[in-house]
Amino acid sequence: MTDFDAGSRTSRVWTNVGLPILGVVITVGAWWGITAAFHIDPFYVPSPADVVDTFLRTPEFLLQETWTTLQRVLIGFAIAVALGLVIAVTLAASRTVERMAMPILAAINAVPKVALAPLLLVWMGFGDSPKIVMVVLVSFFPVIVSTMAGLTSTPDDLQELTRSLKASWWQTFVKVRLTWALPQVFVGLKVATPLAIIGAVIGEVVNPDRGLGSVIAGSGASNDTPLAFAALVLLAVTGVVLFYLVAGIERLLVPWRVAK
Amino acid sequence: MITIDGVSQTFKGKSGPVEAIRDISLTIGEGEFLTVIGRSGCGKSTLLRMIAGLLKPTKGEVRVAGEVVREPRRDVAMVFQKPALLPWRSVEDNIMLPVEIFGRRKADHRAQVDRLLETTGLTGFRKRLPHELSGGMQQRVSLCRALIQNPKVMLMDEPFSALDALTREELAVELQRIHMDLGTTIVFVTHSIQEAVLLADRVAVLSSRPGQVRRLVEIPIPRPRSFGHNAHLDQVAGVSAELHSLLLSDTHLPKTSTL
Ligand SMILES: Nc1ncnc2c1ncn2[C@@H]1O[C@H](COP(=O)(O)OP(=O)(O)OP(=O)(O)O)[C@@H](O)[C@H]1O
Ligand SMILES: [Mg+2]
């Protein structure tokens, strides 16, 4: 496992698949061990077995709720990314606009989103839209900040090059700056993915109808801690899957970066 | 081909003005290979950027092919100290960049790309990404990218200085051959006396800041030249020694340039 054999196939599979699985196994093992060793009441912290039992009692129901939450996350995330990219490009294109808009955007980002949830309820009622809006609100800012950082990080030598070729602003932007920004954009996307899930859950907990957040809110009312944990585990799994999905897309789109 | 007419450059630095170049006048003939040497910070890059139209002189003017330079020209190509390649583009796509930006048809330039790759020994690497190449190969790609412009003038700012000694020599010999084939006018900035003597028809020795032309030295050694084994070792040694002492005795600056 030295750097010498890092290139061989088996060791790559080991580092990319084996190690993460091992990490999960150790964590679940520790969780189990602690609940067993200290005889913790499942009402406070259920053991992994309790959680699995709970899941197996109503798997279709829980998967259905997961799917509901996931849809809200995906739609909201897509909107946040599109909005974030457009805003970032606009801000990077004009210093005037940037100066004017940045304080507003930072202020919007600084507002505690939980405090907005009741307002969203007033404006949009129940259903999907307030949750999706919450996802957007929570996750758009990192996309903007990282994209702008990427767009303004074009190295001097590449800037001199395009200037010496008399490239137009648009050519420079498309052929150099935008692609140069991609690795940074993905940093923002990776930060935004878990935030998107948090946003959906905030929306559902504060304003419950369906989705895993609503399940958690409901389980509190019925003192069903294992159910809450089952929902949490499903959320965590969703988060991990989305994160690796984004990382996979990054590998496809930014191969020169991943290769380093 | 290039007329530098009483050019000065003073930067407005944070702690007062910095006079980088003072009153340089030079005429560079068509097809000439001029090298510029001088100590670090004497304004060599500044001079080159003014010829390239990337920087406006505070006094005087530069003319290329009879026209006053006010902005970059597409028949003037720059080669920088760093290769400045786009990391996501393959070797051949990097070379094609100027063609795309000039809005020319790529198909018309494929054959030329093939030829350039061949002369620089990169044919087997055309599909590779820059990070898969050595520093010397990257600099070759950047040279090809300048040549695809079919420039009348090439401005080169210490293009080989980040490379090891052997690769430097190899590339210098290659550049000399390209210059002999194409007859491009070349202004080449370097720290290396050896490189200056190998490549140049004339060497412009700049004084320390503010940069002025201290001396123009002709190198009348017949081409092709090469390092080490040639029939003009005495001459090379003589010119090198002269350049050396010019650079070393920089402290006794003449009041006016010795043009
Ligand atoms: N944009 C700028 N603003 C202020 N000062 C500058 C600027 N560019 C260059 N200078 C100053 O002008 C002087 C000449 O710089 P230049 O880069 O031309 O030197 P050089 O001869 O190319 O040096 P080197 O051999 O190290 O590359 C330096 O003292 C530098 O600090
Ligand atoms: Mg320099």
Image (tube, coloured by chain):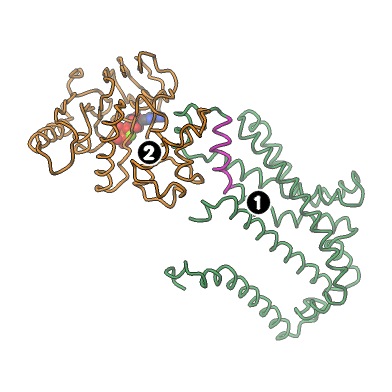
Chain colours: A green, B orange
Residue drawn at (71%, 45%) of the image: A109
- x, y percent for residue A63: 83, 67
Q: Up-down: is A178 above or below A214?
A: above
Mark 2 or 1, closer to the camera: 2
Q: Up-down: is A141 above or below A159?
A: below
* Dominant secondary-structure state across the stretch colored magenta: helix
- x, y percent for residue B237: 10, 37
Q: Residue furthest left?
A: B234
Q: Which of the two residues, B257 or A220, is positioned nearer the viewer here?
A: B257
- x, y percent for residue B115: 38, 38
Q: Secondary structure at mark 2?
A: helix
Magenta-tinted stretch: A170-184
Residue drawn at (61%, 47%) of the image: A185
How many angstroms separate mark 2 from mark 1 (CA)? 41 Å
Quarter residue B79 falls in:
top left
Q: Which residue is mark 2?
A: B116
Q: Up-down: is B82 above or below B10?
A: below
Q: Which residue is mark 1?
A: A189
Position of residue B57 in the picture relative to residue A18 (left or right): left
Which circle marks residue A85 in the picture? none
Q: Would you call the spot at circle 1 few (<14 residues within 10 Å), some (14-19), or many (20 or more)?
A: many
User: Residue A173 in magenta?
Assistant: yes
Position of residue B87 in the picture relative to residue B203 (left or right): right
Badge 1: chain ID: A
Badge 2: chain ID: B
Q: Secondary structure at mark 1?
A: helix
- x, y percent for residue B19: 33, 24
Q: Amino acid at mark 2?
A: Leu
Residue drawn at (42%, 69%) of the image: A4
Q: Would you call the spot at circle 2 few (<14 residues within 10 Å), some (14-19), or many (20 or more)?
A: many
User: Residue A71 in magenta?
Assistant: no
